[in-house]
Image (cartoon, grey):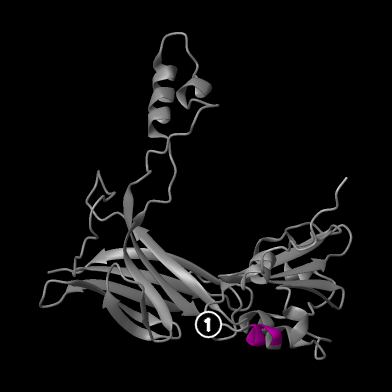
Amino acid sequence: MSEPPTDRALPADDVQREALHNEVHARPPARIRLPARVVCVAVLNDGVTREAEWEQLARLPGQRQLGLAELQPNFLRLRVGSDTVKWERHGEFTRYSIVQPLPAGLGPDARPSGLSRAQPVDAHWWRAIPGRTVAAITFGGRSAPRSRIDGDLSCDRNVIYTFHIDREVGGNFDNVPDVQVHARFARNARGECGIQLENVPGAGTVSGPIETVNEAGGIKFFAGARNDPFFFDAEGYTALVASFAAPGQSGDIAGAFRLGQPRRDSFAARNVSAIVFEMDNGALTAGGSSRVRVWATTGRIAG
């Protein structure tokens, strides 16, 4: 039996081999002893360096000696008191997860006031996580009953879109917006449609053309048509309703929705209009809040 040739070698490593390996390789799973509370925050890391995330992790209690080299594998698990902090850096986002053991017998709906000790990782640390939060408003650009659109975005200067932000104060929300981001469309002298966003946390007022990823005020924003993310089998629903109406029938779910066959999506290849913009995390949660509630409304300007 001949020996394999010794002059053969593997191809040279691609320059991105290590980064791609760390991106797709499964992170070691964490074992969680119940009862416990798990908090997970994911932020876009475009423009956020590994050094900035390292400085944030080093601010955790007992982590002043944390070395930057420990973050090179894009995965790190730390012990902070009795809590566990997990950091994962991916290509487009970074995720922070914290597991806090709870006293025995404490249910999953327990309020912070019901815990027997203070949390080592406080709200100030959460608010300082480097990164941005992305907000999105999607809407149909045509009047009912056919509010979905299949063509261009409706550039109506008399419609105002508002993104409301209610900040938590003292553990409570009052359902009154502390910040309102207003979006309006208009055309220039050449008939080109653009969008203006007012009062964006950390950016103020920005504007730019639609169907373009714009950069201004330190953020990215976009407005235009996008594929409708909603999934629904309208044909199956219609067939199901009809099966209830048939004499002696009580509904045929399997037949109506063709279970076991390729799924039908009535919204596939249909568009909605979208307004998407980034917000600086520090500006978003300004005023001592650690959580926010958001909702969006539309209104038409009279006249």
Q: Is residue 51 magenta?
A: yes
Residue sitting nearer the eye, 236 or 65: 65
Q: Quadrant of the N terminus?
A: top right
Task: Point out residue 153 in the picture as x, y percentages from the top left corner.
Answer: 24, 60
| Vertical comparison of 246 with 93: above or below | above
Residue 53 visible in image: yes
Q: Is residue 207 left or right of residue 234?
A: left
Residue sitting at x 37%, y 59%:
138
Residue sitting at x 69%, y 85%:
56
Residue interval drawn in magenta: 50-54
| Vertical comparison of 261 with 294: above or below | above
Which residue type carries mark 1? Answer: Gly
| Vertical comparison of 1 with 244: above or below | below
Q: Is residue 175 left or right of residue 41?
A: left
Which residue reaches farthest bottom?
64
Residue 116, located in which quarter of the rendered image?
bottom right
Residue 176 visible in image: no
Task: Point out residue 230 in the picture as x, y percentages from the top left corner.
Answer: 43, 48
Q: Is residue 197 left or right of residue 123?
A: left
* 10 Å crowding of disc 1: few (<14), some (14-19), many (20+): few
| Vertical comparison of 56 with 94: above or below | below
Which residue reaches farthest top?
248
For disc 1, the marked residue is 47
Q: Quadrant of the C terminus?
A: bottom left
Q: Secondary structure under badge 1?
A: loop
